[in-house]
Amino acid sequence: MLRALIFDVDGTLADTEATHRDAFNKAFAAAGLPWHWDLPLYNRLLDVAGGSERILHYWHSVDARAAQEPSAREAVARLHAAKTRIYECLAGDGRLALRPGVLRLILEASAQGMPMAIATTTTPANIDALLRGPLGAGWRRYFKAIGDASTAARKKPDPQVYLQVLAAMGLCGADCLAFEDSHNGLLAARAAGIPTIVTPTAFTSTHDFRGAMLVLAGLDGTEDEASAMEPQGAARAQPPVDLAALRHWHAGMSLAAA
Ligand code: XBP
Ligand code: MG
């Protein structure tokens, strides 16, 4: 029986990575660094979950000696904090819209008493910047548990953040559904035993989604740019995803697994 919905944030609740990339580049420029992450490079860097981990990984690739200095971690932390402040300005107050169908599903699940959680590798401030617009300043009341970069040190594809929210809700993975956008996120949710629906974005449309319960263009039935890019997997147009459909899919998956 379906007992909770668990949402990833970046790429799933909203298509945020273009804004993250902009914030990283603005932080590099403000720090006087000659770094610029263009789209092809950022697509590759997204394999590294976590913004500070991503910065350190890139620094190693351009200046391994400097990146290994004892002071490097502190420098990365300062740079990432600046990036987060910039992201909050760029994404805050509803400037970054939720993906089609997401708000409707959250409000429907809330109205029907279906518990929800967030399991993300992103920084807590980024979640508040994204959700306080569409869900209001009290957005946390919609979620029974929130796992993020402040609770889970090990980033996706490690399942730590998913295991944390399952434990907080006292649920087992098989009784939940996870919503993800990326290969790393799918691996993390599956490692926690959670059936997973993937809604790719243009950043992740070429990822490997084997193991997903479903790969959908989005949650509201319209084609988004990712599905227009003919991604791998079975992304396709479909009716709007509501709680009845999720219960039906989850029951079918449970029967198949029985
Ligand atoms: C996606 C990520 C994050 C963002 C950047 O998180 O990997 O690192 O790219 O945000 P999600 P930070 O699990 O929600 O898909 O700079 O705060 O890490
Ligand atoms: Mg994601």
Image (cartoon, rainbow, N blue to C red):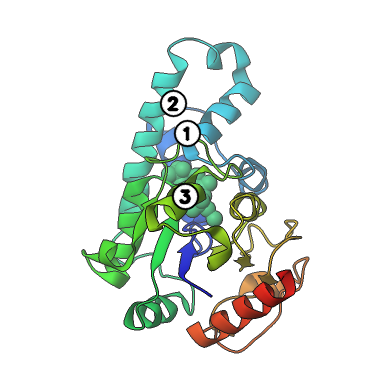
Q: Which residue is mark 3?
A: 20
**Does 225 sit above or below residue 208?**
below
What numbered label is drawn on residue 254?
none
Q: Residue at x 58, y 76 (%)?
A: 218
Q: Which residue is mark 2?
A: 76
Q: Are marks 2 and 3 in contact (CB under 8 Å)?
A: no
Confirm or reject: label 1 Cβ below 8 Å from ligand 1: yes
Q: In the rendering, at what x and y percent does residue 244 appear?
A: 52, 87
Q: Are marks 1 and 2 in contact (CB under 8 Å)?
A: yes
Q: In the rendering, at what x and y percent does residue 258 appear?
A: 71, 71
What numbered label is drawn on residue 52?
1
Confirm or reject: label 3 Cβ below 8 Å from ligand 1: yes
Confirm or reject: label 2 Cβ below 8 Å from ligand 1: no
Q: Which amino acid type is marked by label 2? A: Val
Q: In the rendering, at what x and y percent does residue 211 appear?
A: 73, 60
**Does 178 sit above or below residue 251?**
above
Which mark is in front, 3 or 1?
1
Label 2 to label 3: alpha-carbon separation: 16 Å
Q: Which amino acid type is marked by label 1? A: Ser
